[in-house]
Image (spheres, helix red, strand yellow):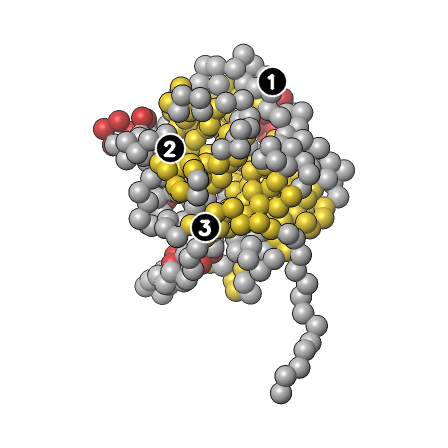
Amino acid sequence: MNFMLPMEKYFGNFELVHSFYGAMPTGVTVSETSRIFVCFPRWGDDVRFTVAEIVEGQLRPYPNAAINSPNPANAAMSFISVQSVVADGRGTLWIVDTAAPNFSEPIIGGAKLVAVDLKTNTISRVYTFTEGVVLPTTYLNDVRFDFRVGKAGYAYITDSSSNGPGGIIVVDLETGYAYRRLSGTPPTSPDPYFLPKVEGNILMNRNKDGSTSPFRLASDGIAIAADGKTLFFCPLTSRQLFSISTDSLRDRTIPEEDLLSQVEYWGEKGASDGMITGAKGNVYAGDYENNSIRKILPNGNMETIAHDPRILWPDTFSIGPDQYLYLIVNQLHRQARFHYGRDLREKPYSLLRIKINELPAPAF
């Protein structure tokens, strides 16, 4: 007998930009000239290149194939396992290399922030980190920039460690000097009371041998206000949103215990992987538990702008000059490590976009 009952309502007008039938992507960025770059961390898939540009519907290793071949003898000048790519709006593509394939301990000297000149498609600078900044447990995740402070600007990188302290790494782009802030504090740490649920199931580590453990990941999503004065961030395994003054992050005279008191709490926004800020001051964040995208207004009000069953784990966001919000959808929660060794992901993964009528937040 056929009968219709009320159903959950879905909304949001998406366009498909690209389908991925190979390795699983995590990062995307759209440059000021509408070039699109993506990255594929080496988590076990057959990753032929860890950074690519989408050109006429095809993936091309970027800036070339040779740099995308890991070279342990020259770890600082080859891409090992890239987690994030960010175009800064002024001609540079920034690449965050975790140097931690399969979430291993970072290869010494390999964890780095790389600047690529988009006009010449060549590396212009490489920033590596000391052992006191990139710890044996560190997993470099995402990065945001402000070129209005200091002589060459600052970068802010999240450490989303699964078994060590999370934190925010601050980088002086003139000198390359970097340091950790809010390291191991509650706002950058996994929420110990959070139990993620995706597609109706509890998300946890489920190993081939039948053993299980909670899924815990530290500070991940990061977004910087349009004026550069506020940094928003969130742990991956948490529904909470936090912020802090970037002036305070850069001020080394403020001790950690005093810095923690300056963190502001914005409320529950849903569990997010990627976040991005628009020029109007709105923060866009995914909600991977509910296949949704949230918009957090400058006054703290939140609204859902898309809710769609195809948003199977919204990962990284980028806003293009066309005023579209671009997002990677990669079914991260269906990986084998969450299902006793069975890979439940279905090809293709996707790059989607939705019109938001807002330009990206300027960094300069």
Q: Tell me the SS state at disc 1.
A: loop
Of the residues tagged 1 and 3, which is closer to the observer? 3
Q: Is residue 282 left or right of residue 313?
A: right
Q: Is residue 53 left or right of residue 150?
A: left
Q: Amino acid at mark 3?
A: Ser
Total numbered circles? 3
The residue where tag 2 is placed is 62
Q: Three-letter amino acid code at disc 1?
A: Arg
Residue 277: percent from the left, percent from the top?
Answer: 63, 35
Which mark sits nearer the N-terminus, 2 or 3? Answer: 3
The residue sitting at 45% across, 24% down in the picture is 118
Q: Nearer the viewer, residue 308 or 154?
A: 308
Q: Quarter-wise, where is residue 208 in the image?
A: bottom left
Residue 19's label in the rendered image is: 3
**Would residue 340 be seen by someone viewing this image from the given angle?**
yes
Q: Which mark is residue 226?
A: none
Q: Where is the N terminus found, in terms of image quarters?
A: bottom right
